[in-house]
Amino acid sequence: MEALIILIFVLGYLAITLEHNLKLDKLIPALAMMAICWALIAFGIDGYSTWFDSAKGALVEGFSAFSHDEKMHLMEETLLHHLGKTAEILVFLLGAMTIVEIIDYFNGFATIKSFVGTKKKSKLLWIFCFLAFILSAIIDNLTATIVLVTILRKIVLKREDRIWFAGLIIIAANAGGAWSPIGDVTTTMLWIGDKVSTLNLIKYLLIPSLVCMLIPTLIASRMKAFRGDLADDGGNDTDSVSKHGPIMFYLGLGAIIFVPIFKTVTHLPPYVGMMLSLAVVATFAEIFSRSKFSISTIDGQEEHEEESHHSPVHGALSKIELPSILFFLGILLAVGALESLGQLFGFANWLQDVMPKMGTELADARVSDLVVLLLGVGSAVIDNVPLVAASLGMFSEGLDDPLWHFIAFSAGTGGSMLIIGSAAGVVAMGMEKIDFFWYLKKMSWLAFVGFLAGAFVFVGMRIIL
């Protein structure tokens, strides 16, 4: 039965990886393999000899001697534990996405466009890459990519030029998301899972992530595609800017930045702070829009239909990327199924057995570095979310161990090597219809050089610090 569960998991992964070839949204195989894996566990619960207690981080002693009812009860508790941890991440993401959509409702991101006042391609590239690096750390790399590609469309009207900028935005956004606890889903997972703290994550990853962005940008700025000026083809048209746009822009970003501070002060899970931030931003949004609205659906909905239609909160909630939320739900619970059977724990032990024992702390660190680098390369092929979820079940190091920081960097930036390797790449691919093989030929080597440069800097800083 365990072999069948692993086979279902592998097939689900394959379907996710080949999403564009199969023309099947990745949330479908993610949800399917999650449900099938847990169903198979329930059917074959009496045949399993080991069970991993995720709450305690260890195998359950004497599990094989448990009665059927005891095993079923433990399975339900474990599933509830995984659901709770997954819900923390999803609720956090829902709050962040809603705040960003509220900012967009007031056209607050036009504030960024006002900063751009050049036609020189190389200068424009540096501006967008730095914006991607900074914004992705604040509003996550996926959202930053959507925002910047949208702005890019209003400045660079020729698609042939625009896709080059979009490719570097993907690399910069993924690099920026790696050093912030709210910049990437994977770093958020590590942060919420108490594997990294905000200050130490920034301390150890800011410089390596910056190098990961600077090297590809520096090389690209000297390439033919970024020489000269943009053609003057009407790209200076400006959008109508709401008088409340800049206020909502700074308020929204400030509210998201407040979340790590709230967690540090109260020691409550991050989603609590995000809900508080959302409440504050939504309050100002409703005041500025002067519309009456109830977030929940209640009796008498028809009476409020016209008013709620103009509500920024209602509009923001209607634009949330629910397919992405469901995908994360499916993939995280599917990984939880393998973890519960002790598969990931066993894989970690296998790694320890097959890796050469060099006898010194430095040598062991090098072995770990190789594993994490391979994880980074793997995140370009397989979504980094399940890889990090798997690492949470494979390793037992404590809070702020360098291993977790390196995993955060590798998983966050390694996905840039293929356009399907990160959420930022996938969304840019969809928005600009970027060809997989064009990105492989033009951008992958730049991302790889940046990845290695950042990893080298991280290892050097770890030795020094």
Image (cartoon, rainbow, N blue to C red):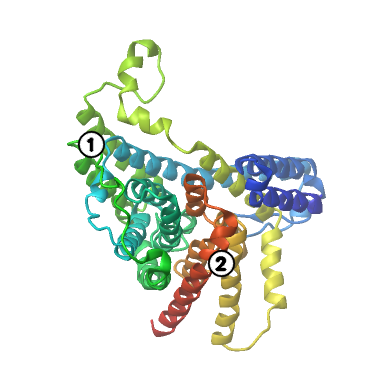
Residue type at tag 2: Gly
Q: Position of residue 197 (x, y in %)?
A: 39, 63
Residue at position x 66%, y 55% in the image: 339
In the displayed structure, 444 sits above or below 459; it is above
- Label 2 vs label 1: CA separation? 42 Å
Q: Secondary structure at mark 2?
A: helix
- Give me the disc on residue 376: 2
Observer-nearest of 344 and 183 = 183
- Residue 398 visible, this angle: no
User: Which quarter of the figure has residue 134?
Assistant: bottom left
User: Visible in this render: residue 270?
Assistant: yes
Local crowd size for mark 1, using a 10 Å CA cut-off: few (<14), some (14–19), many (≥20): few
Instruction: Establish if 422 lies above or below 394.
Output: above
| SS category of the residue bearing label 1 | loop
* Residue drawn at the location 31% of the way across and 61% of the way down: 229
| Residue 185 against residue 459 in the figure, above or below | above
* Along the viewing direction, whichever of 76 and 104 lies nearer the viewer: 104
Number of the label disc, if any, that sits on residue 305? none
Residue 216 sits in quarter: bottom left
Q: Nearer the viewer, residue 208 or 159?
A: 159
- Residue 195 position, x and y percent, is 47, 62
Judged left or right of residue 389, residue 8 is right
The residue at the far bottom in this view is 359
Q: Residues within 10 Å of mark 2 (few under 14, many from 20)?
A: many
Q: Are marks 2 and 1 in contact (CB under 8 Å)?
A: no
Report which residue position mark 1 lands on.
240
Q: Residue furthest left?
A: 243
Residue depicted at 63% across the width and 54% down the height: 53
* Percent of width and height locating residue 79: 62, 44
